[in-house]
Structure formats: structure tokens, C-alpha cells
Amino acid sequence: MKASELFIRCLENEGVEYIFGIPGEENLDVMDALLDSSIKFITARHEQGAAFMADVYGRLTGKAGVCLATLGPGATNLITGVADANMDHAPMVAIAGQASTHRLHKESHQVLDLELMFQPISKYSSRLLTPNIISEVVRKAFKLAQTEKYGASFIEFPENIAEMEVEGAPLPVKHPHPPEPPADRVDVAAELISNAKNPIILAGNGVIRSKAWKQLAEFAEELRIPVANTFMAKGVIPFKHPMALGSAGLQANDYVSCGFNRADVIICIGYDLVEYHPYLWHPTKDRKIIHIDSSPAEVDAYYNIDVGVVGDIKHSLMRISKLASPHTGTAMRSLRQALIEDMNQHKDDPSLPVKPQKIIWDLRTAMEMEGIAISDVGAHKMWMSRMFRCEYPNTCIISNGFASMGIALPGAIGAKLAYPDRQVVAVTGDAGFLMNVQEIETAMRYKTPIVILIWNDNAYGLIEWKQMAQFGRKSHIDFNNPDFVQLAESFGAKGYRIEKGQDLLPTLQEAFKNDVVSVIDCPVDYSENLKLTSKLGEMVCPI
């Protein structure tokens, strides 16, 4: 059989359901082999969109999302999505065609050293220089992508290798089991927790990757320790849980940071440094830190741990909770109440432009609790991260490691393909929306009825927020937008424009019932940004 056929068999063996990508001359043999495969190829309209689809699909399912491009510009267009998956620890395998090996040694049309280019943004980057290594390379790529900490793998597949004849078969798929936590580290952690006066938990995305959210909720309840989650770990503990404080990371002096300032022991569980810089929540460097994760702690001057419990997070939490003494459970309730008051603010405000708090209130009201919101990057991300209530993990996806604009729309397509029976909404600013707007056609073609909620301010709102806070004036952040309703309709989608504040909720409810893509243009009042910044900057931590 052809090497391209063996390659596809190896992907089937890994359980690949979808490949997101764009065909090209240098992957012709792979594309032909896919015609006889159970794998469904999702033809995207831009390689970055394809990579974001694979990124979110991998993050939601725990199985490596797969994206494919041709050589040169096709491969370089994958880079942003691959870097996002790698830094956000989402499992992904990216594949790119390449020119014949006969011209890789010299200057040649569209030829770049892709293996070298993808090395800094992946866990594993390899080039297939002979068909005999295909089974090994594919198995290793998936194994590393799906082993903690998750990330991206890259395979470069030259066109002349793809058409060669080869004998071989896929290798058996083996999933490594996380190690058991060392008993002596469990004992030390339990003792530190028992002796603490005001412990707090910082829960990160690693808890979701390890599927340890149930154990986290039980741990917090049994020991009566409040839990703040990172942006990327929203829903890791239900917001209705009495120990849930909400999301940490808006800025240094917000409500949850007041909790860190009062804590003497900070228990970091499944926390990745890219989620929330340690210098923001531990500027004094004098608190005791317990690191509970599947991987050893990263080196950081503000993250100097006292004890590291490395191993299966589920088992670590269960074992520590059996040994540690419970606390009163009354600490920091005022912080939680303050957050709830913020969430309720403006929920009945009919004004236009719409307040961010009102947009989030109506979105949460319209959506099922197990629906999935994919947030783009911008000012709206800060509001979604803080105030969008989640009761389940992976119901609000936020890119906060690489934090790339343009992820929401293609990411929502990946989410809908992963979970076709759940509501999916892309929450995006007008700038991020237009970065991958072409993927509306992809969503229409594959009949993935997603809702796209645009927070429209005709500007780079987050940058304006930062400029005004730092300099008191804005610089080159304004732009003009097309008519988003007409734009949606030109794709065959449904378009809505919010012209009265009270229309947002019924419009969202109607959009979620549609069997096609729905685009909602909602003007947003970002004057609330500076009000929130001022409020948090002046706030005195409640007793």
C-alpha cells in the first residue's frame, strides 16, 4: 500500500474522528486516501480556522484534535492555532505537506524547514524521511500530545514519501497511567493544610484535563476551604458550591486577590503558570504554597513551593482530604457575596448600548447549563471570565495561555462537532469576529448551528481599556465595521441587530432554537470597563 494509506490507517487507529484543514498539491495522496477512510475531513476556509477548530475539539474531548495544511503558506497559517493549543495545553496533532525530499536541501519554491519552525511551539516536531517510520511517528505524536501536560505535536509529510509503497501496520495504542502521589508528600501537604489559618485553593485547567473536578469539589467541601479558579478552569467547581469564589485573574486587586492577600497557605491544584502570573497573586513571596499536579512545578521566583504532590490529581486530593483537618468554612464569604452583587448589577437595565453585565446575565439565562460558550480574546473576555456563571467544567472555554484573537468562531464549530446535541455560542468582539469570519461558510456547509454573539464597540476595546487606565487617552484603536446582519445573511445565516436592551434575551432564545448559524450584533457599553477598574483599584478587602 501507499505510505499515505498507512498514514491514514494510523490516524484511524488513534481514534481520529475529524481532520480540519485545507487540501493542497503536496498533500494530494493523503487527501485521496481519506476518501476510503472513516475519518471525516472538515474543509475550512483558512488554516488558522482549521487549527482553532482542532484546538477546541481537543480541549473539550481530551483526544487530540487534528489539523492539516499544505507546505509553505498553508503550514505557516497553522502556527497561531498550534501555538495556542500548545500553550493552553490542548491536545493537538498538526500535519503539513512538504515538497519532495529531493529539493529540501536547497532554495526551492514554497519550501521552509517546517520541522524546525514548529519545534518551539510543540511538544514534538518530526519529519517523515522514509515511509518505514510512519507508524512510530504517528504513535509518538499522539502519545505526547495526549500525555500531561497536553500540547501540540507536528508531522511534516513530504509528497514523494506519501506516494511510496510500504508494508506496515499501526502500533497498538497504549495510554500511560499517571503515577501515584508519594505518601510522604501527601503527609506533609495534609499537615500544612491542617495548621493553616486561612487557606485558599487556586484551581487550574489541569483539574479539568485530569477529570478531577468531582474530587476537587469534595475536597473543598470536606476541608471547608474556598476555591478560586483560573479563567481556563471555569466550572471546575460549580458556582453554586458554597466554597466557590469565582474566577481569579482580572487584575491584582480584585475580590479574589483579597482572598490571596489574607491567605497563609495557597493550595495550587492543576495550575499552569500561563493561566495567571504568580506575581499577581503572590507578590509578597511569603505564603506557603502547596503544588498538587500531575507534573512538577515550573520554576518561578513567585512560585517557590513548600511541598509538591506530583501524581494522579484525583488520588492526591482524596488522600490529603482523609488526613487533613477541616476548617471553619466561613472565611471569605464576603468575597463571594460581592461577586454575586456584581453579577446582578444591570440585569434589568434596558439601555443601549448594552452593559456587559446585562449581556452576560441574558446569555446565561438563555443558555442551558451544559451549553458551551467559546470566548474570543478582548474586553468581553474579561467580563465573561469574571461573571459568566458555570456549573460544569468545559462550558466556558477561554484561551488565556496564548490568548489569541480569532478563536471563538472556528472554535465554536469544533465544539459543535464534538458535542452536536449541546448549545454552542461564540462570544466575540467585533475585531476578533472579523479575523475568521469566513468560517461562517464552513459552519453552514457542515450544518453546525452555532450562535455568534458580537460585542460591538467599533474598536479594539481591551486595548482602549488598558490605554485609558495607564495614559488617560486612547491611541489608534478605532475602526469601522460592515453591516453584520447583511454579512450574516450573505452566508445564508440569520442576522439580528439589538436595538433595545430588552430585546437581547428573546433574541438569544430564538437564536438557540434555529437550525442554522445565527449572528447577533449587540452594541456594548464599555464605559463599564473603567468603572470596574476604578472600583477594584480603590477597593478595601472586606473583613
Image: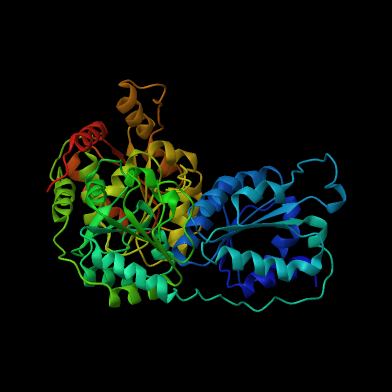
Residue 94, picture quadrant: bottom right
Q: Residue at x 37, y 70 (%)?
A: 212
Q: Nearer the viewer, residue 341 or 157?
A: 341
The vertical placement of 532 against 442, above or below, is: above
| In the image, farthest residue toward the right | 102
Residue 36 makes an appearance in the image: no
Residue 86 shows up from this direction = yes
Q: Quadrant of the N terminus?
A: bottom right
**Which residue is at the front of the view, 293 or 111?**
293
| Residue 183 on image: x %, y % | 41, 76
Tell me where residue 99 appears, x and y as whole percent.
79, 50
Report how many numbered discs are placed on residues in the image: 0
Residue 149 at x, y percent in the picture: 51, 62
- In the rendered view, does 102 fall on the left or right side of 97? right
- Within the image, what quadrant is residue 369 found in? bottom left
Apparent side of residue 20 relative to residue 524 in the rendered image (left or right):
right
For the point 21% across and 58% down, the residue is: 198
Q: How is the image coloured?
A: rainbow
- Percent position of residue 134, x then y: 74, 67
394 left or right of 133 in image: left
Q: Residue at x 63, y 75 (%)?
A: 13
Q: Nearer the viewer, residue 231 or 412?
A: 231
